[in-house]
Structures are given as C-alpha cells and as structure tokens.
Image (cartoon, helix red, strand yellow):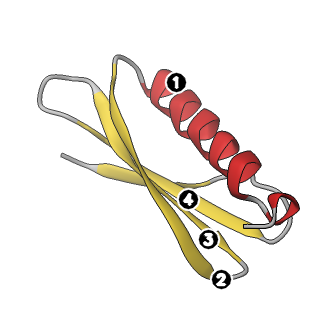
Amino acid sequence: MDSTRLDLSVPDGWTGWFELMRTPSGTYAGICELSLRGIPRCALVITQQLSWDAAVERATLRADHFVRQWGPARGH
C-alpha cells in the first residue's frame, strides 16, 4: 500500500497533515494529525472511504470540526 501525505488548510496557529493510503480492497483510509502552536493535539483516524476525494473530504471535515471545538477561542 502506497501512502500520500498532504498538508491541511487550518486556521492560524494550527498545523495539520493527513496521510492516505489505498487499501488492498481499493478503498482509501489514513490518519490526520493536528498541532496547535507546534504541540500535537489530535490524531484522527480516517476510516475507509470509497474514493480518494471522499477520503480527503472526510479528513478536512473532521479536522475543521476538531479545530472549531478545541480551538483557543473556547479556552481549551
């Protein structure tokens, strides 16, 4: 299984990337990592998606949700 690592577009102060791989069954799955000011804050598992685009969309959606819920504006 080959994997591809891509950067995420996240708000200032946050950095993020995700790594997707094609499974033997032809689906896509991977992991997403988010850091706040250089400190790792979250690793999200991206479960099997039927297409590359669906996996990228899922990773982006989950990362956006995490940043909204746990960003500095909420005092976490």
Q: Kindly report which numbered mark, 4 or 3, lies closer to the viewer in this rendering.
A: 3
Q: Earlier in the sequence, mark 4 or mark 2?
A: 4
Q: Kindly report which numbered mark, 1 or 4, lies closer to the viewer in this rendering.
A: 4
Q: For marks 1 and 3, give the CA distance.
A: 23 Å
Residue plotted at (57% across, 39% down): 62
The answer to whether the residues at label 3 and label 2 have Cβ atoms under 8 Å apart is yes
The residue that label 1 is drawn on is 53
The answer to whether the residues at label 4 and label 3 have Cβ atoms under 8 Å apart is no
Q: For marks 1 and 2, give the CA distance.
A: 28 Å
Quarter containing the C terminus:
bottom right
Query: Vertically, is 36 above or below 33?
Result: below
Query: In front: 16, or 40?
Result: 40
Identity of the amino acid at label 2?
Answer: Gly
Q: For marks 4 and 3, give the CA distance.
A: 9 Å
Identity of the amino acid at label 4?
Answer: Trp
Name, please, the residue furthest toward the left: 24
**Element type where label 2 sits in the image:** loop
Identity of the amino acid at label 3?
Answer: Ser
The residue that label 3 is drawn on is 35
Is residue 38 shown left or right of residue 54?
right
Query: Vertically, is 37 above or below 15?
Result: below
The residue that label 2 is drawn on is 38
Q: Which mark is residue 17?
A: 4
Identity of the amino acid at label 1?
Answer: Asp
